[in-house]
Image (cartoon, helix red, strand yellow):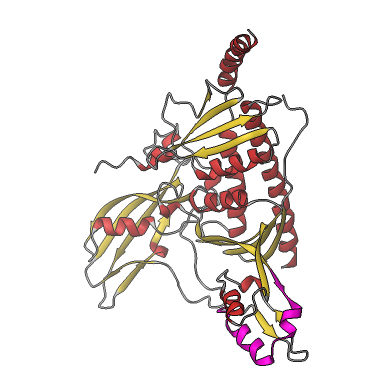
Amino acid sequence: MNAPDRYERFVVPEGTKKVSYERDTKIINAASFTVEREDHTIGNILRMQLHRDPNVLFAGYKLPHPLQYKIIVRIHTASQSSPMQAYNQAINDLDKELDHLKNAFEIELAKHSREY
Amino acid sequence: MDGGVTYQRFPKLKIREMRDDVVKFELRETDASMANALRRVMIAEVPTVAIDLVEIEVNSTVLNDEFIAHRLGLIPLTSDRAMSMRFSRDCDACDGDGQCEFCSVEFHLRAKCLTDQTLDVTSKDLYSSDHTVVPVDFSDPNEPGEQRGIIIVKLRRGQELRLRAIARKGIGKDHAKWSPAATVTFMYEPMIRINEDLMENLSLEDKRSWVESSPTKVFDIDPVTQQVVVVDPEAYTYDDEVIKKAEAMGKPGLVEIEAKEDSFIFTVESTGAVKASQLVLNAIEILKQKLDAVRLSDDTVEADDQFGELGAHMRGG
């Protein structure tokens, strides 16, 4: 009856930003990124990739509520870096990892197709 | 900003087995978050085409209209074109009413039973306006004569079904009918180490009962040397039965089993909408697009730069 529309889960409403950024008012080099219409898929890979960065002191994400279709990624870095820099770095590294994976899969695919 | 530092990984990938509908591969040197993201994307975010709107002209069958509409939606349609199609909600050409070639495919079905024999209405009776989007063909190449469409409804003499259906692009997150995956699973590769010294001290009988304690056939006894050997580590289901058995026999540490945290064995089964191998490639592509979408926009960065200067003054003061 009053269930939200199914598309609400993945369509960013007009006038809303996909990613918004909010600095922590009390701690330097700490910030929260609110990512609209994303879930554990993005949240968890970002978090794990951020953990690989030695400048990142804390990285975590939460899905505040199953019917609020957003995640909050919180990053705290050392002074050499900044949350924004770490966030961009994590996305770039994951992007490159996926490029590599795509290549690797295509090479394997070509090998296997030849065997037939 | 980027001083050339990178924490990128270079995962290794090996395809073990490949058929049109199933692919098995090993993924190594990455972590569970990447494996799980791929799995989640394959199930819920790789687009396919499925019937989404049905206009029934005549329905005198035993099934009601919405029942038939639901069944039509669940029929897998060949969706190799889905990645390049538009979602009808952001299709400019037709305002999302699903009448244009960029975002929709029209189907027609006409069936009437005129004999005393029951007539099966199957997915083969659906006529598509686009030859690239048709119901998936499940016929066995070894038995070419046999028709194996998906049964939609059965008709008796005099009953008729006539309808028009529109198929649209969608994702599994919206409705499971759009999911291209039948099952996608991954398991950690197990590392099984038998303590040979302890094992040597067991009698053949004990060895046998220990080997038998595993519900799946992971271990066996070499008929020549009578030593316990691991025959299929991947049959292990992490059930701990052999470990409990070893303890019960008073031999704790007889075997050590751990999950290798960076090695995954994937099994991808497709519904037939796209080939299993293509499904994996599409999932990688979609995940890349998703990551691109969550990049910070320039205005966010700018707004923060100004704030950052202000903050620096405040901190520096």
Q: Is residue B193 magenta?
A: yes
At a point 76% along the width and 79% down the height, the residue shown is B197
Report the front residue among B211 and B48.
Answer: B211
At a point 43% along the width and 23% down the height, the residue shown is A15
Q: In the image, residue B238 lies at what x, y percent?
A: 58, 68
Q: Is B312 drawn above or below residue B176 in the view shown? A: above
Q: Quadrant of the N terminus of chain B?
A: top right
Range of the magenta residues? Answer: B192-216
Q: Quadrant of the C terminus of chain B?
A: top right
Q: In the image, residue B213 lies at what x, y percent?
A: 57, 82
Q: Is B163 drawn above or below residue B198 in the view shown? A: above
Q: Is residue A85 magenta?
A: no
Report the front residue among A37 and B20.
Answer: A37
At a point 62% along the width and 79% down the height, the residue shown is B246
Q: In the image, residue B300 lies at what x, y percent?
A: 56, 21
Asked whether residue B228 is in view, the answer is: no
Report the front residue among B12 and B160.
Answer: B12
Q: In the image, residue B209 lies at what x, y percent?
A: 60, 87
